[in-house]
Image (tube, rainbow, N blue to C red):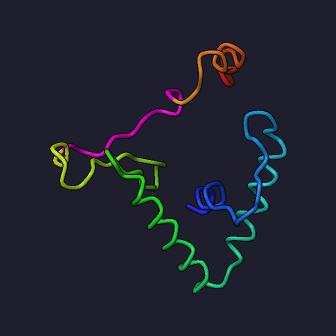
Amino acid sequence: MIGGMAAQLLRIGEQAPDPDRDSLNYLEWLKGRMQIISAYPESEFLGLLAMRHRGNKLLTHFFSIEESEEGFIALPHEGSEAESLPPARFPVSACVSEFAKRVGGKPAKYGG
């Protein structure tokens, strides 16, 4: 949740490093933001969380994205014909481009 907040919320005029072009700086920037957000007093953190939640609600045309202990899940939009469908999870591999998969190769096998 804090990682999502750190990645999604920017102050006016703030620029984040491009995660595709400068992944190392982006990861360091993101870690720093996560530390800052997690150190906020509870009342400020809850206010920030509420603003993020309201902003995310504006993006729920077809489905909403929620966090769970296992990661992100997609929930059908309330009031839609799909409302009775169960939540959907997508494997991380579905988010990785074919090029990235080819470059990464097969993971090494450890153990016997």
The quarter of the displayed image where residue 33 is located: bottom right
Q: Residue reaching furthest front?
A: 13
Measuring from the top left, give residue 98's x and y in whole percent. 59, 16
* Closest to the observer, 2 or 69: 2
Q: Residue at x 70, y 65 (%)?
A: 12
Task: Decide whether the magenta segment is chiefly helix, strand or loop.
Answer: loop
- Does residue 84 appear left or right of residue 89 in this picture? left
Q: Residue at x 23, y 55 (%)?
A: 78
* Closest to the observer, 106 or 103: 103
Measuring from the top left, give residue 31's x and y in whole percent. 76, 57
Measuring from the top left, give residue 52's x and y in whole percent. 52, 66
Measuring from the top left, give residue 63's x and y in whole percent. 33, 47
Indicate whether residue 42 is drawn in magenta.
no
* Closest to the observer, 41 or 69: 41
The quarter of the displayed image where residue 62 is located: top left
* Figure quadrant of the N terminus: bottom right
* Figure quadrant of the C terminus: top right
Measured along the vertical axis of the image, is residue 17 above or below residue 49?
above
Measured along the vertical axis of the image, is residue 12 above or below residue 89?
below
Counting labels gives 0
Indicate whether residue 89 is drawn in magenta.
yes
Stretch of the chain drawn in magenta: 85-94
* Closest to the observer, 18 or 1: 18
Q: Residue at x 68, y 61 (%)?
A: 10
